Image (cartoon, rainbow, N blue to C red):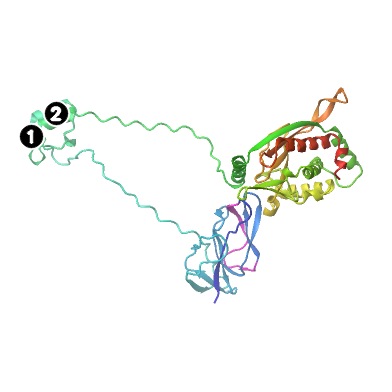
């Protein structure tokens, strides 16, 4: 007998707690193979096709396109062992299993039905709509409402009420059988008038509200955590990049793939990290230890239509400028297409942020938690500069280093930044470490 298995939205990567359904790749009634992609989802970091670990017939889908689901929520149910003409449907389309991961709740019963060629496919399963909450109201007594004749005998009482604008129908008489007496009218006359009900104030115009979720939400949380946990400090220096730009022009003049400025700066960073390994580390709070990492997995900031992402170049210390250029170009293209895999966005040990592409000179970068440092690079532009004792126009760049003060002191951070600046000003310095 076929068994209905429930496939839930799996954990798609570090820090991701939800994903939005972009496109279903299967319909109810389709036969799927093990590890066949069944849905395309968009996380805060990338577009991902999610494969199903079960093979069989799709009996239900959960969520329409555009719906956001948390990790661990049901995606589809699959009748494992069912042929194309036989489907097992769970009695309850919702999931009773609240744990994150795979598997179905076998405590629910199932019923069999056949899907014949040409018959209508079962409807997409939807989460049960909660019953509306009961509304409880309490009576508010504002005074008796008399629908018959008013219980007043004396014309003097009527005149007194009329002279003072008192509605006799709103009074409860203290006389026999509710008879309204002069004393009742006098008491009503002496009673303080109810405060006028203020008209509701006009609502102040409200600005546009943008949900802090998806990529923006992940970035906000990561940066907030960085500032909460890391005692960071920033140092910066201006450097003459004229010789670096000339070296790049000479490299590209000999033919072959073009080498980017970012690749040259990345190669300088890996050399600097070899001299100052304290900055290629992370802090293990649980063990109260600094962990110095053996490889440089270099993150770089890439702006896309969906926002800022930080792809990671693995083992950057083993790559030359040409290899780094090619990998930067590849990851940037994939990032802009929204196709980065979670593995491309995690595991970085140091980040290089070229904000000069936005036309700005300087910044104080926020460390990409849980890394220990980030190098920021401003725009390279012609400026007056004292060169060899004379005033000249040179290509100048500002470099800024934000570092975790727990992993090193200012002397180490300053030594790292000065080495980077020296290599920028005289690329021959880099040759000593190659």
Q: Which mark is residue 267?
A: none
Q: Is residue 311 above or below residue 95?
A: above
Picture coordinates of residue 428 (x, y %)?
A: 88, 38
Q: Nearer the viewer, mark 1 or mark 2?
A: 2
Residue 37 lies in what quarter of the image?
A: bottom right
Residue at 84% across, 48% down: 320
The one nearer the camera, 74 or 388, is 388
10 Å crowding of disc 2: few (<14), some (14-19), many (20+):
some
Picture coordinates of residue 321 (x, y %)?
A: 83, 45
Query: Spatial distance from mark 1 to mark 2, Cα to Cα?
Result: 16 Å
According to the picture, the residue beneath numbered tag 1 turns out to be 153
Residue 357 is left or right of residue 110, and the answer is right
According to the picture, the residue beneath numbered tag 2 turns out to be 186
- Residue range in magenta is 16-34
Residue at 48% across, 63% down: 96
Picture coordinates of residue 317 (x, y %)?
A: 79, 48
Residue 97 is left or right of residue 330, and the answer is left
Picture coordinates of residue 36 (x, y %)?
A: 65, 65
Residue 175 lies in what quarter of the image?
A: top left
Residue 318 is left or right of residue 29, and the answer is right
């Amino acid at each position: 007998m076929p068994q209905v298995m429930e496939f839930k939205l799996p954990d798609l990567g570090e820090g991701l707690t939800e994903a939005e359904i972009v496109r279903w790749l299967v319909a109810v009634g389709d036969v799927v193979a093990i590890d066949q992609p069944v849905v395309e989802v968009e996380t805060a970091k990338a577009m991902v096709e999610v494969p199903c670990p079960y093979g069989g017939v799709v009996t239900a889908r959960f969520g329409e396109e555009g719906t956001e689901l948390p990790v661990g929520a049901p995606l589809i149910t699959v009748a494992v062992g069912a042929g194309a003409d036989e489907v097992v449907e769970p009695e309850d389309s919702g999931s009773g299993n609240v744990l994150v991961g795979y598997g179905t709740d076998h405590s629910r019963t199932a019923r069999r039905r056949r899907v014949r060629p040409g018959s209508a496919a079962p409807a997409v399963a939807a989460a049960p709509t909660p019953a509306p909450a009961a509304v409880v109201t309490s009576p508010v007594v504002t005074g008796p409402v008399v629908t018959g004749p008013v219980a007043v005998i004396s014309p003097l009482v009527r005149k007194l009420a009329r002279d003072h604008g008192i509605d006799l129908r709103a009074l409860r008489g203290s006389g026999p059988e509710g008879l309204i007496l002069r004393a009742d009218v006098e008491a009503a006359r002496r009673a303080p008038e109810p405060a006028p009900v203020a008209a509701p104030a006009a609502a102040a115009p409200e600005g546009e509200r943008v949900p802090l979720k998806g990529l923006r939400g992940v970035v906000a949380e990561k940066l907030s955590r960085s500032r909460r946990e890391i005692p960071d400090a920033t140092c910066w220096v201006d450097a003459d990049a004229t010789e670096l730009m000339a070296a790049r022009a000479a490299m590209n003049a000999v033919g072959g793939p073009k080498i980017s400025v970012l690749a040259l700066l990345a190669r300088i960073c890996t050399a600097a990290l070899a001299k100052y390994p304290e900055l290629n580390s992370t802090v293990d709070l649980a063990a109260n230890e600094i962990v110095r990492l053996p490889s440089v997995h270099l993150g770089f900031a890439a702006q896309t239509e969906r926002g800022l992402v930080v792809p990671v170049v693995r083992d950057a210390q083993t790559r030359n400028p040409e290899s780094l250029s090619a990998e930067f170009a590849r990851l940037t293209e994939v990032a802009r297409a929204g196709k980065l895999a979670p593995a491309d966005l995690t595991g970085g040990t140091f980040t290089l942020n070229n904000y000069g592409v936005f036309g700005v000179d300087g910044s104080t970068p926020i460390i990409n938690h849980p890394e220990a440092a980030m190098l920021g690079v401003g725009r390279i532009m012609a400026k007056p500069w004292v060169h060899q004792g004379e005033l000249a126009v040179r290509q100048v760049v500002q470099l800024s280093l934000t570092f975790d003060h727990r992993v090193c002191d200012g002397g180490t951070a300053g030594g790292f930044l000065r080495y980077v600046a020296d290599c920028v000003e005289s690329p021959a310095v880099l040759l000593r470490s190659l």
